[in-house]
Image (tube, helix red, strand yellow):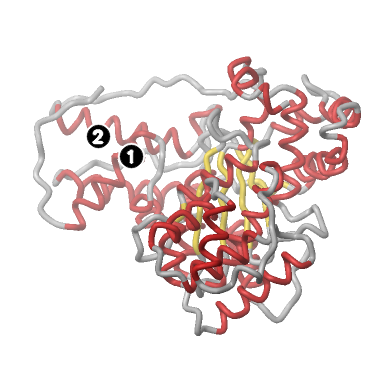
Amino acid sequence: MITSAKISVNTPFQLQSRRAVEALRSGVPNRDAVQKLGCSQPQAEAQFENMLDEASDTAAPPRDSLGMLVSGDFGSGKSHLLTYLEQTALERGFVCSKVAISKETPLYDLGKVYASAIENGRILDRSGRFIEELAQMMHPESDQYASFFHWANTAATDGLLNPMFPASLLVHERSNDLELNAQIESFWAGSNLRVTDLRRGLRDIGQQRTYTFRAPKAADLPPQRLRFTAELIKGAGYKGWVVLLDEIELIGSYSILQRGRSYAEIARWMGKTQPEVYPGLVVTGTVTDDFATVVINPDGTKKDRDYVSARLDANPRYSAISSHADMGMNFLEYDLLPLTPPDDADVADTMQKLQEMYSEAYGWDAPPAQSSAGGAGFMGRMRYKVRAAINEWDIMRIHHGSSPDTVSEEFAFEYEENTALEVASKDND
């Protein structure tokens, strides 16, 4: 652990550089780091831009998929890419949510993934809670809101939404009850809303006979909320919703039934479960490049291609999603976009920018660092080069005249089933 005396920050640029360096030091690039270092994945950038273009084209029907998965080794720049794409989307008029798949946010549980997307939602130049900000941006006199309101009522008539959604939208528009409106926003975000409270709201605005509804089943709500929020975002005047799913490889630690459900969710997020489509939703996820080989392939250690569908088919609760699980596995096996390894020019450019950033952050002239591509194993990855340079500069800056040499150990993700994950969610199986 490197410690140093307190260093004053004199300019906003110095503060931005300091934040960027500290994020890179921990291996989690933030917006400051990405803004300064840029991105060198032209194929992924181009495909993402194309998806944004298509999501913005309201005159064209939605295509089968507005999703992509990018793959790469640990430390190859997947999280950096997602942060770069997030900023790109925000600047183009989309709202964004970055979701890290974890024990608390298992991919097979749409309700929890949706809640995380709401909790981590970002809107350019606005800092309040995601749903509250969107609600404030809706203007009933606008064409976007009119289209959204019409869609919500039509979707309820067609059985795609519980009538509580259009009813709550009408109450939110016309009611002066701030407490009830806050409860409605929380309902959209994932909390419960009592039927009696919503009916009271309808009565207060003279619309008690407009909607007839019962409380929806809990299992029905997550996909309806996802569909409703994707449209709400457009109703608030934005072009669409970008959801970024990081570290999908964690599903390799789930039980076989949970993995099967996760594959079905990948099919949903990638837009493969028609007629269940989500116009305006653009999804990009990351996964390790050996996941399919180790976990799905019949020659791998788990052989999910051989066993997952049979396990789902044998369970009455999940037999209906067996075909979706196959779609998800197909996507992970055949439709991944591999990250482009950096060449000498990419590494040299990154290391020069990093050197300038570090020098500005600490008011100290950092010497040049290694700037060639490649290296033995994990030492060739950009994350290793960046963190090694920062650590060595720290030592040289604090201990003048020293010549540090970094020694590291490789991290390899283990696709071992985690009993803690299984126990925490066994009730869902």
- Please indicate whether residue 377 sits to the left or right of residue 259 in the image: left
Question: Which residue, given by chain and number where applicable, does mark 1 sit on?
Answer: 369
Give me the residue at 86% from left, 26% from top: 311
Tell me the CA gap for discs 1 and 2. Answer: 9 Å
Above-or-below relation of 332 to 188: above
Q: How many numbered discs sit on the rendered protein?
A: 2
Give the residue pinned by disc 2: 393
Q: Residue at x 41, y 49 (%)?
A: 348
Give the vertical position of 102 relative to 333 (above or below): above
Side of 371 where 390 appears, left or right: left
- Name the residue furthest top: 419
- Check whether the beta carbons of the residues at disc 1 and disc 2 lie within 8 A of each other: yes
Front-most of residues 138 and 338: 138
**Residue 81 at least partly seen:** no
Q: Amino acid at mark 1?
A: Ala
Using the image as rendered, state which of residue 282 and residue 420 is in the foreground: 420
Q: Secondary structure at mark 1?
A: loop
Nearer the viewer's eye, disc 1 or disc 2? 2
Secondary structure of residue under mark 2 = helix
